[in-house]
Image (cartoon, grey):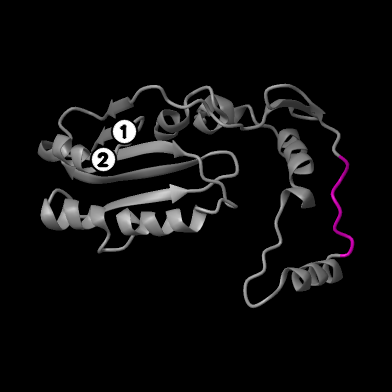
Amino acid sequence: MARVLTYGKGYPYGEVATEKTVNAIQSKHLQAYYHSFFRPQQGYIVFVGDITEQEARELAEKNFPELEGRQDRHDHGADGQEVVEGLGLVRRPKKPPRPTRPAGSFRGPPGSAAAVIKVCYPVELKPNSPDAQTAQVMNTILGGGVFNARLMQNLREDKAYTYGAYSSLDVDRYIGSWSGGCSVRNEVTDSAVAQVPTGEHGGTESEGR
C-alpha cells in the first residue's frame, strides 16, 4: 500500500502483485524479459578508488572487448509504452504526476496493541544528481539508521513513543522516494504521526498489529 500512496495506482511503481498476476507469469515471459532488458547498454561498470576516467575507459575496453549491446527490436510507442517481443505491451516508467493532496491508508484488525506508521512521498532524485550524496547525508542525520539521528532521538529518547524510528531515501533514474516511520503504542499514534515530516503532499500508512 505504501507504494500505491507514493506513486499512485496508475504508475508502474505503484502496481501491487497479486496471486492472479503472479500465476499469470510463464517461463516464456521471463525468457523474453531477460533477452529484452538484460543488456550491456542497460548496465554499469563501476570503478572505485584513485583512478582517472581515461584509465577506467582503457581498463574497460581491455577486459570487455566483446561486450556489445544487442540490436533493439522494440517498437517504441507514445507515453513510454512499447511492444516487446514475447511480452506484448510494456510501460516504461516516466515521471509520475505530482500528488495534488495528501492521501492516507489505515488498516489492521480491531484490538491491535500497536500501530506501524509510515510516511512516504516521491522525490525527484536521480543517481547522477549533484544533490544525491548531499541528500543521503541529510537523510542519515534525519533518520538513516544511526542512533543519534533526529527521528530516533525525538520519538524514542525524548517522547518515549517507540523503540526505534527510521527514515530511508531511495534514488532512482525515473523517480525516487523518501519514507520515515516507526512502531508505536496505539494511544500515541496520532502524536507520533505529528512528529514525522510529512511534506506538503505526503502519503501516510498506519497498520495495526
State yes or no: residue 89 in magenta. no
Q: Is residue 38 left or right of residue 115?
A: right
Q: Nearer the viewer, residue 87 or 181?
A: 181
Residue 181 picture location, percent across and down? 29, 45
Residue 36 picture location, percent across and down? 78, 39
Describe the element under mark 1 as helix, strand or loop: strand
Q: Is residue 25 left or right of residue 71?
A: left
In the image, the segment drawn in magenta is 65-71
State yes or no: residue 68 in magenta. yes
Give me the residue at 45% from left, 57% from top: 134
Return the residue at label 2: 116
Quarter holding the N terminus is top left
Given contact means CB atoms under 8 Å apart, are the residues at marks 2 and 1 in contact? yes
Q: Amino acid at mark 2?
A: Val
- Mark 2 and mark 1 lie on one chain; the one further toward the N terminus is 2
Within 10 Å of disc 2 (Cα), the crowding (few <14, some 14-19, many 20+) is some
Q: Amino acid at mark 1?
A: Glu
Give me the residue at 70% from left, 57% from top: 44
Return the residue at label 1: 205
Q: Is residue 147 above or below residue 128?
A: below
Residue 56 picture location, percent across and down? 75, 70
